[in-house]
Image: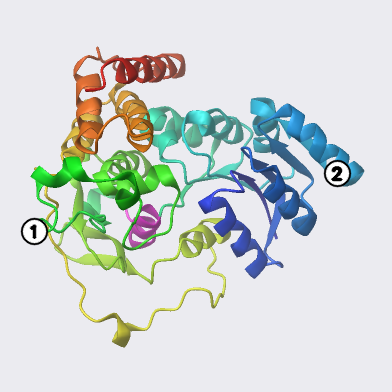
């Protein structure tokens, strides 16, 4: 039985994690749950799974939950609540599915408390990958991937040294605007929020869905892979695979390729991270190859999707630049969703912010957070 702390229990990854726990009641116990503002769903999850401790971002709502639950469960709130959950003595693994930068401090706290972490929040490794992985090595804990792409690479590598790897190949669906004939670059300014939120393969949260439309999501994953697998950016590539069946591939130095395949369902990589190194039996994900038809692959169109080049630049330069890329993108996506900028201006906002930044090499955590704050202000100020 693994005691799991789930930070971000009411979001897309969080609710999928709850499903995995329901599938494996003899192997996974939800010891702690944290949510942002969805008190009603957190209350429902708590009553069903009976965690020891829960946390909500709003202290007033947390007090209401405590009154509703009585002494059955301890209710915390705010950043202090996240840190308490991340360091619960009984926890075996902490799954971090909080969108944005809020997951960074709990991730480091969990590592320093000797807990394995499962990372669904890209920002943690994009912003502070060097620090996080160094701390994990220092404290002898695992950093396990929850993204389907990184889980696929992890499964393909299976402990093989990075010296045996020629290239890591992250697959991308290409998003809703992959078809150049239907969506030439000249039409990108006409893309609506509603259209951008219609992902062809996955049901995800709003931010990650927009990132998938711009391919910033894949760019962030490239930087994440660089740190997770201790490999330079030059050996991390992207292949467009519209069917989303091959979740990623590893090309080895002898020319062999290994790939991990399954029908698209986030429950599979979540379950693998939580049960690793074992594989637990589950009927939730089943793949019928005769029904799949043709699997196709193509090069990403970096002229129409310059986010990939910006991410590669940030990953190669390193220092504070990946944090700036990430923060500027968050601000730009929010502006697009609020209809104050158009679709191509998301990438343009990030480009301008990166160009204005003076990079600090090998930054401290405080310098990373300062760069994050600066980038948010700069991106809001310089939007086209």
Does residue 166 appear in this view?
A: no
Judge the density around disc 2: few (<14), some (14-19), many (≥20) Cα neighbours within 10 Å. few
Residue drawn at point x = 35 percent, y = 51 percent? 197
Which of the two labelled residues, at mark 1 and mark 2, occupies the earlier sequence position? 2
Q: Residue furthest bottom?
A: 290
Front-most of 348 and 128? 348
The residue lying furthest to the right in this view is: 71
Nearer to us of marks 1 and 2 is 1
Q: Which residue is mark 1?
A: 181
Decide: is 90 above or below 101.
Answer: below
Categorize mark 1 by other alpha carbons within 10 Å: few (<14), some (14-19), many (20+): few
- Residue 253: name its quadrant: bottom left
Q: Residue 254 placed where, x, y %?
A: 15, 62
Q: Residue at x 26, y 59 (%)?
A: 173
Q: Residue at x 36, y 49 (%)?
A: 209
Q: Looking at the magenta stretch, what is its main secondary structure?
A: helix
Mark seen at residue 68: 2
Q: Is residue 210 magenta?
A: no
């Amino acid at each position: 039985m693994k005691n799991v702390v789930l930070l971000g229990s009411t979001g897309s990854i969080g609710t999928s994690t709850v499903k995995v726990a329901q599938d494996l009641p003899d192997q996974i116990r939800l010891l702690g749950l944290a949510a942002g503002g969805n008190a009603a769903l957190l209350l429902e999850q708590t009553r069903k799974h009976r965690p020891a401790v829960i946390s909500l971002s709003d202290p007033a709502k947390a007090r209401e939950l405590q009154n509703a639950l009585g002494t059955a469960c301890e209710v915390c709130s705010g950043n202090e609540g996240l840190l308490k959950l991340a360091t619960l003595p009984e926890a075996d693994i902490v799954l971090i599915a909080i969108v944005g930068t809020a997951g960074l401090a709990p991730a480091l706290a969990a590592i320093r408390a000797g807990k394995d972490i499962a990372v669904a929040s890209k920002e943690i490794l994009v912003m502070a990958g060097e620090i996080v992985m160094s701390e994990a090595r220092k404290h002898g804990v695992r950093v396990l991937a929850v993204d389907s792409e990184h889980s696929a690479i992890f499964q393909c590598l299976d402990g093989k040294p990075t010296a045996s790897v020629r290239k890591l190949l992250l697959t991308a669906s290409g998003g809703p605007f992959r078809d150049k004939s239907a969506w030439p670059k000249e039409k990108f300014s006409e893309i609506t929020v509603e259209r951008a939120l219609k992902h062809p393969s996955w049901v995800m949260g709003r931010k990650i869905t927009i990132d998938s439309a711009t391919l910033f999501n894949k760019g962030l994953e490239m930087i994440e892979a660089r740190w997770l697998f201790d490999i330079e950016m030059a050996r991390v590539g992207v292949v467009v695979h519209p069917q989303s069946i091959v979740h990623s591939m590893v090309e080895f130095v002898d020319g062999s390729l290994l790939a991990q395949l399954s029908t698209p369902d986030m429950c599979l990589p979540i379950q693998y991270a939580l049960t690793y190194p074992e594989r637990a039996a589950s009927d939730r994900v089943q793949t019928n190859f005769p029904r799949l038809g043709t699997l196709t692959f193509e090069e990403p169109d970096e002229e129409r999707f310059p986010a990939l080049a910006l991410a590669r630049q940030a990953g190669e330069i390193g220092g504070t630049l990946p944090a700036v890329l990430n923060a500027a993108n968050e601000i730009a996506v929010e502006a697009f969703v609020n209809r104050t900028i158009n679709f191509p201006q998301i990438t343009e906002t990030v480009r301008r912010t990166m160009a204005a930044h003076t990079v600090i090499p090998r930054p401290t955590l405080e310098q990373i957070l300062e760069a994050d704050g600066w980038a948010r202000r700069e991106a809001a100020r310089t939007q086209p």
